[in-house]
Image (cartoon, coloured by chain):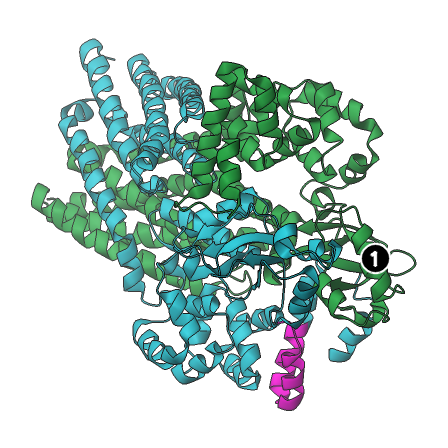
Chain colours: A green, B cyan
């Protein structure tokens, strides 16, 4: 494998589509073969030369026993990088194979924000042992003082900051000596370490070597503070197409940067959180080992649904005499309940996501809201007409058909209205609008649909008969 | 306003939290005030100096009349950048105010991939006029030859590629002269323009000026081809923490790069697509003007639900004699139907998102799948016990309570199973697993729940009586 890769390295190219995945799969097969042969020294050489992301891919696809063997072959620095590149699900599994002492050792080689990410996934007792062991790492503790999901927690302390009075020539020399691996921007600070400007590396090599940084820098730096919410950080990076955004403390001193790779992770994480929240659960499910605990995450909305559907049932009970007399009414209960929930969930989801991505301004949601209500009405009209016709054809009951049609039109319009207004109200009240829209709107729709349908059917059928 | 900003520009800093948003709001107020005063020359100066993202924010929050006035004040280059920074919803609204000729003019100032994004949002007739007008822009046509959602379509042609035989000194000179605004990496190509390596700007300034690029470059370039799917591109950039990934054609010639800002947009767009798909609609809703067309997007899953719930009703019809005799059975139909759908939707959503983010390997989904089924079983146990007790307390009917308990346990376990298996099967069959999980699993659960509950209740109540 190593030879194969070296050969192609002359051009750095392979001709196939999906090459990265193919390369990863070939590598995985080689690793498995070498593990079977117990060719450990060969394997060690192979693994430690790879990109950590590739080794992470391999780890993800090995058995527990194989993972243990591979872990022992990795240099601590490589192991640290591999842990960083694992997704939270595989990470939780692999962390079980690592003793607290080993983990603390690996953390020496991790950027502190990444070390914190890993600590967050650890089960309680292990977390405590590791926290104790890393007490001597001031870099990690510095970040831990900031709240969860803030810029301070996720920032990298790996940046180049230079004094505003340095000349371009001196600055280039400093950049050459800097231990940081990647330099995107050079941040310019005053004597007190306060952020005053930014210069790109290219600007630097373009400028007159004798000019001072403060003469060539862009003083309009876009920055965030240590307690800016990570979602806000992502939004700013996205809005201004930045490669990194500087983070300052309350005295405006530059303390870190958040880079686009962190931003990409935040965006994916926040979308996942929202998606799971919408159906009444959380992303912690993925790495939580205890099924009981997962059930507990979901319990609040399970309880909500049970209570709501008991109310829905109580409404049926209220109309039990009608039902006994005209049992055919019950055949269409599922239809009325389902369609309202369906449309309400669509409107609610449209609003929640559009709010999350900033497409809707919570101060001016009217246009989108009215369109959602309009669509709900049209859907109600279509469903009402179709279902009414079908019911008439099956049951030959004109009043029942009419009750179905009107109920669908009403309930679908109302659930679309509720579904589009509730997220806006939540947003206005500063509550996360990504509420569990599924369980909420379905239950609401069931109660509402039953009430409209049964009262209308009772009125039409009892009053006017069949 | 301008003065205010200039004053703070000395430090580039403002002390408040959420500063970017506050600044944007203050700016918006100034623009509105100047519009009222018709202070056009002042406004023109103010707007054209801003970051296009800020002007886009303003445009988003103005009335139609105000937008028209502002558009006329913007330089074509600024207008082009502003259009690029708008979200698709506001973009669609603002494009209505721009004539095809003007738009074609703006497109001269846009990177071709961004121009294509805008063409995609245009309504049919306008699209045709604009396409005709931009026939003379070869850059845009070059990208249009590639399929939608491929690397070729979204790539930027703004990159620096240098010959492998250049010396470091010559290369730095070329970088200085390059017209490209941002340089992340310098791509190294052979005489035929084929990608052979990559050098970072920092590496360049660190190297011996007399060495050739091919001696200092990293030959292991990670790249994609023009027809790589955009989701795959995003995954590669994320996996290897790249700032940009080069795109090559079938002859391995370097033709473009995809940068992280594009990747961030892709990730947000794909998550939105998935979220909307799960509830049975599409993100095109947001910029589609015709409510009828939006209803049409949703029609397939509306029809599915209508048919499914008619079947669900047919099952009730099958058991109508039981129902007539024991009307209390009907009181708990909503409970049984809702809880199955609830849990099924949770499992399905967990799987769909975990597949989309690569957390689950579709070849080894077993662990996560079994856990989902286990959770479904536990939820069924809890809900079955609670609901059974409540039913017994309300109805004093031991057999009915038992029927409810068993039905909930069974239906919740089964829907959790179906919800976790279906996305895996879809993925295996190469169908997008983000199927409309809401409508699908709710309808399935209603049919299943009714069947289990009514047959069980009939058996227990009719056989053993109350």
Image coords of residue A340 (percent x, y) = 32, 46
- Is residue B426 on the magenta stretch? no
- B211 over B358 or under it: above or below: below
Image coords of residue B147 (percent x, y) = 35, 58
Q: Is residue B23 left or right of residue A346?
A: right
Image coords of residue B220 (percent x, y) = 56, 45
Image coords of residue B24 (percent x, y) = 66, 68
Q: Nearer the viewer, residue A221 or A288?
A: A221
Quadrant containing the C terminus of chain B is: top left
Q: Please indicate, yes or no, whether residue A195 appears anywhere in the rendered image.
A: no
Give the letter of the chain under mark 1: A
- B29 over B188 or under it: above or below: below
Q: Secondary structure at mark 1?
A: helix
Disc 1 packing (10 Å; few <14; some 14–19; many ≥20): few
Q: For the point 86% across and 61% down, which residue is it?
A: A170
> What range of the chain is rendered magenta?
B27-51
Q: For the point 68% across and 55% down, which residue is it?
A: A244
Q: Please indicate, yes or no, whether residue B269 appears anywhere in the rendered image.
A: yes
- The residue labelled by disc 1 is A173
């Amino acid at each position: 494998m190593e030879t194969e890769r070296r050969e192609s390295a002359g051009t750095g190219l392979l001709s196939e589509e999906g090459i990265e995945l193919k390369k990863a799969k070939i590598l995985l097969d080689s690793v498995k073969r070498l593990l079977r042969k117990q060719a450990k020294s060969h394997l060690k050489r192979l693994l430690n030369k790879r990109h950590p992301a590739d080794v992470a891919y391999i780890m993800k696809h090995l058995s527990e026993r194989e993972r243990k063997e591979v872990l022992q072959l990795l240099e601590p620095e490589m192991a640290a990088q591999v842990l960083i590149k694992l997704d939270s699900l595989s990470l939780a599994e692999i962390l079980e194979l690592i003793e607290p002492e080993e983990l603390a050792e690996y953390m020496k080689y991790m950027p502190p924000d990444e070390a914190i990410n890993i600590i967050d996934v650890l089960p309680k007792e292990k977390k405590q042992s590791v926290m104790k062991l890393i007490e001597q790492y001031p870099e990690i503790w510095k970040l831990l003082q900031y709240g969860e999901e803030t810029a301070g927690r996720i920032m990298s302390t790996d940046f180049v900051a230079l004094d505003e009075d340095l000349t371009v020539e001196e600055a280039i020399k400093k950049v050459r000596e800097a231990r940081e691996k990647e330099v995107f921007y050079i941040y310019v600070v005053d004597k007190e370490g306060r952020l005053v400007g930014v210069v790109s590396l290219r600007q630097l090599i373009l400028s007159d070597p004798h000019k001072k940084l403060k003469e060539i820098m862009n003083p309009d730096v876009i920055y965030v503070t240590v307690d800016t919410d990570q979602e806000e950080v992502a939004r700013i990076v996205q809005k201004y197409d930045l490669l990194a955004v500087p983070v300052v403390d309350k005295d405006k001193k530059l303390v870190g940067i958040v880079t686009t790779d962190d931003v990409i992770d935040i965006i994916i994480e926040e979308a996942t959180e929202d998606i799971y929240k919408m159906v009444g659960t959380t992303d912690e499910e993925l790495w939580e080992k205890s099924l009981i605990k997962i059930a507990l995450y979901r319990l609040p909305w399970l309880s909500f649904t049970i209570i709501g559907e008991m109310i829905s049932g109580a409404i049926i009970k209220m109309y039990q005499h009608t039902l006994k007399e005209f049992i055919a009414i019950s055949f269409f209960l599922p239809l009325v309940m389902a369609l309202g929930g369906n449309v309400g969930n669509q409107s609610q989801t449209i609003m929640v996501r559009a709010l999350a991505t900033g497409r809707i301004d919570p101060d001016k949601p009217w246009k989108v809201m009215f369109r959602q209500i309009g669509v709900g009405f049209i859907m109600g009209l279509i469903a009402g007409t179709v279902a009414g016709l079908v019911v008439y054809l099956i049951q030959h009951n004109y009043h029942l058909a009419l009750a179905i049609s009107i109920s669908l039109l009403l309930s679908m319009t109302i659930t679309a209205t509720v579904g589009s207004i509730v997220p806006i109200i939540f947003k206005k009240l500063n509550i996360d609008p990504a509420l569990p829209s599924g369980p909420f709107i379905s239950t609401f729709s069931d109660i509402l649909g039953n009430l409209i349908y049964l009262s209308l059917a009772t009125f039409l059928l009892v009053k006017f008969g069949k």
